[in-house]
Image (cartoon, grey):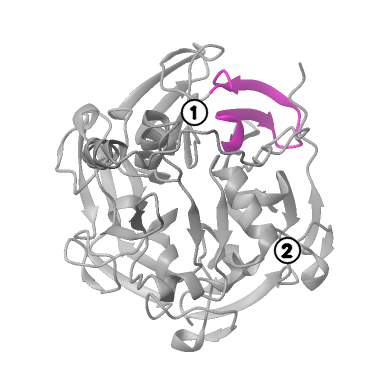
Amino acid sequence: MLPQLAKLEAHFPEELVIIGVHSAKFPGERPGGTLRSAVQRNRIQHPVVNDRDFQIWQEYGVRAWPTLMFLDPSGMVIGKHEGEAPADALIQAVRELLERYDSYGMIDRAPVEVLKEEACPGHELAFPGKVAVDETLGRLIVSDTGHDRVLIASLDGPVSDVIGSGEAGFADGDFAHARLREPQGIAVHGDQVFIADTGNGSVRVADLASGELRTVAGTGEQGLGMPKAGPALEVAMRSPWDLALHDGDLLIAMAGTHQIWRLDLESGWAEPFAGDGVEAMRDGERMRAWLAQPSGLAISGDRLYFADSETSAIRYVELSPGDQVQTLVGTGLFDFGDVDGIGDEVRLQHPIGINARDGAVYVADSYNHKIKRLYPDERRVESWLGSGEPGIRDGSGADVKFDEPGGLAIAGDRLYIADTNNHAVRVADLCTGQVVTLGLSVGS
């Protein structure tokens, strides 16, 4: 749900009815079960219609995601807005409309009964988004996104610490009282755990030695428009989704602005690192390249690989000595599917997670419910794990089932997988391809 709509809904609880229409770009988003998971994951409280055949989209002449249609009390269309809009402007516009129609006696304030989705009761994890590992200290770190917290566990599963109270919010302090909102990407350096606090448009760092969480970037509010370089705590970030550490810098996949940003951890200065903010695909000089919702980062050698989710592509930025963005697989915003092969014949469907080891890039091909391997020198992609159908089943190869895997981390010969819609972490043996579900117990 757009945060602006949440504020609008809260501002006019008796006068305004919001109805979401889900007209999915990707086929993997269209099944009813997938939509239900998305409603739960995004904590949507208003009713949502599954417009899987684009009938409503066509009847209302919609051209872009998101689009807001304004209807008067009689059901007539009175306005349309494409793209995001500031919450204050929306509230003012709706207030003026309400005053007009209230003067006509047309506003009905009778309560509207809505059947609300319950958010994954009974799960130790809720929609885990990303995972990270510290091989030296034997730690597994999991973004327990749906519970607004981050878990610190051993590589075999027992949880030793919890970062965040589990109540959504924005507050620094000791782990038990600090608050996060829908955390995603994680980067680890010793006792420091950097967290992409996606729902708060911020980056936080947890000190495992002191048990304290503090903010290192962002204002605690999702930004609008294109943020400018500046002191990190003054930059209004938009959906920071994943993180990677490199030579004293924290690289940030800024999905909301279609960029990758760089935070100098010593000076506290944040600035764009790749992408000029246009949502499209164009290679070349990193600051002139076009990206589209980068959502996963992995460093290997002198390359920063990234999952460019909206173009269903895997691309990289040269870290040294060049500064070019290059595409390995993927061809554009509306080219997607499930096709193995070489180069431009390959099709992925909204990959979100990525990692690299021993000359291979592992890809969480999220909407195809698979883990794939990409060999960069050949630009060759092969399906490795997953049947392609959503579900949960351990095993090996195509017998395995995932449901929108979203994050990958490698420790030794094991690949850890955040299996988002299954509320689970899965572990794959890199040698045998055998997959098991990890037992994570948080305790009371």
Horizontal side of residue 25 vs 358, given as left or right = left
Determine which of the numbered discs, if any, sits on residue 390 in the image: 2
Q: Nearer the viewer, residue 267 or 99?
A: 99
- On the image, the x and y values in percent for residue 197 come to 43, 34
Q: Secondary structure at mark 1?
A: loop
Determine which of the numbered discs, if any, sits on residue 190 in the image: 1
Report the magenta residues as a range: 142-167
Q: Secondary structure at mark 2?
A: loop
Say which quadrant the C terminus sits in: top right
Location of residue 316 (image quadrant): bottom left
Horizontal side of residue 99 vs 148, given as left or right = left
Q: Decide whether residue 166 is among the magenta residues.
A: yes
* Residue in the picture at 81% in, 52% down: 436
Q: Is residue 346 above or below residue 181?
A: below
Q: Is residue 296 above or below residue 351?
A: above
- On the image, the x and y values in percent for residue 36 come to 65, 52
Label 1 sits on what residue type? Answer: Gly
Q: Is residue 300 above or below residue 199?
A: below
Q: Does residue 416 show up?
A: no
Direction front: furthest residue: 105
The answer to which of marks 1 and 2 sits earlier in the sequence is 1
* Residue in the picture at 23% in, 35% down: 88
Determine which of the numbered discs, if any, sits on residue 153 in the image: none
Q: Nearer the viewer, residue 336 or 44?
A: 44
CA distance separating discs 1 and 2: 36 Å
